[in-house]
């Protein structure tokens, strides 16, 4: 099975890109972030026509996550545990069946956190703490689990072309990276880094100052795998070429292949 994640930066504006990429890469499941529309406004029909079941946790204008799956959803649950007052649409969890059992996949859109001197950074850190608690509980199930999405975290200097430019940014502050390491420390594997330690693996390039042309990127879109998913891990990749399409998202898809068969 091929599972992918992509911050599309408005699904309605990038629908043509999404359809073209789905036909090219042929993923079995896709986690989308920043769909920027309500559930009702999500363009279901063109994606269902390509053979995907659709689950959406949307929000008008901002945020929003979705899941596409060629397998029927057994369960779908929006919202991250730990704060009933949090109305931002950033988390969608689904369960599908494979020939060897269930596969649990989560589409995540972590808060950006900037400016760091505001409550936005506090919200980011609290959200990451909630994700840690959620993951700790889910790992007790000993299932193949993938946490896929835009983490808004640059894990290490190697994950930025110019790490010095990010020193005071919420994506790269020590508190941010420490929480990401704590997440990995629960027993998760960073799929892309399990494949390569190359220094030019990026998933985001700013729209400004010719960043893509200079390959001035950062790696902030991640697929983290539970031990049971890692046991099935085959390979992972980043579809950098999509950033070169006309009017693209500033993020590109990241995908993993697992040795699993849909039921």
Image (cartoon, helix red, strand yellow):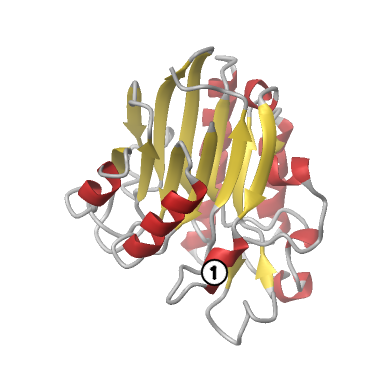
Q: Does residue 114 appear anywhere in the picture?
A: no
Residue 217 percent across, percent down from the top left: 67, 70
Q: Residue at x 34, y 26 (%)?
A: 73
> Looking at the image, which is closer to me, 107 or 230?
230
Residue 27 percent across, percent down from the top left: 48, 41
> Looking at the image, which is closer to me, 93 or 241?
241
Q: Residue at x 53, y 63 (%)?
A: 251
> Looking at the image, which is closer to me, 44 or 163?
44
Q: Secondary structure at mark 1?
A: helix
Q: Is residue 241 above or below residue 80?
A: below
The residue indicated by pointer 1 is 243
Q: Does residue 7 appear anywhere in the picture?
A: yes
Q: Is residue 106 left or right of residue 39?
A: right
- Quarter of the rendering occupied by the C terminus: top left
Q: Is residue 41 left or right of residue 109?
A: left
> Looking at the image, which is closer to me, 168 or 70?
70
Q: Is residue 179 above or below residue 212?
A: above
Q: Residue at x 41, y 24 (%)?
A: 95
Q: Is residue 7 above or below residue 135?
A: below
Residue 184 percent across, percent down from the top left: 70, 37
Q: Quadrant of residue 214?
A: bottom right
Assess disc 1: are there few (<14), some (14-19) or many (≥20) residues with their C-alpha within 10 Å of its C-alpha. some
């Amino acid at each position: 099975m091929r599972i992918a994640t992509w911050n599309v930066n408005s699904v309605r504006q990038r629908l043509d890109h999404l359809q073209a990429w789905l036909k090219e890469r042929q993923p079995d499941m896709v986690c989308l972030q920043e769909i920027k529309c309500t559930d009702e406004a999500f363009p279901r029909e063109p994606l269902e026509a390509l053979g995907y079941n659709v689950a959406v946790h949307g929000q008008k204008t901002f945020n929003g996550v979705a899941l596409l799956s060629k397998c029927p959803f057994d369960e779908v649950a929006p919202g991250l545990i730990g704060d009933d007052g949090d109305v931002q649409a950033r988390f969608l969890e689904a369960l599908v069946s494979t020939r060897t059992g269930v596969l649990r996949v989560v589409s995540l859109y972590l808060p950006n956190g900037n400016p760091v001197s505001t409550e936005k950074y506090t919200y980011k850190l609290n959200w990451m703490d909630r994700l840690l608690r959620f993951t700790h509980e889910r790992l007790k199930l000993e299932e193949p689990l993938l946490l896929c999405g835009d983490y808004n975290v640059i894990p290490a200097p190697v994950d930025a072309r110019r790490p010095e430019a990010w020193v005071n940014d919420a994506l790269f502050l020590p508190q941010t990276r420490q929480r990401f390491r704590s997440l990995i420390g629960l027993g998760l594997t960073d799929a892309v880094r399990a494949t390569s330690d190359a220094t030019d693996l990026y998933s985001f390039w700013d729209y400004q100052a010719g960043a893509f042309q200079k390959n001035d990127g950062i790696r902030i879109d991640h697929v983290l795998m539970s031990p049971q998913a890692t046991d099935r891990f085959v390979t992972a990749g980043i579809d950098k070429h999509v950033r070169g399409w006309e009017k693209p998202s500033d993020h590109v898809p990241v995908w993993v292949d697992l040795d699993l068969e849909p039921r």
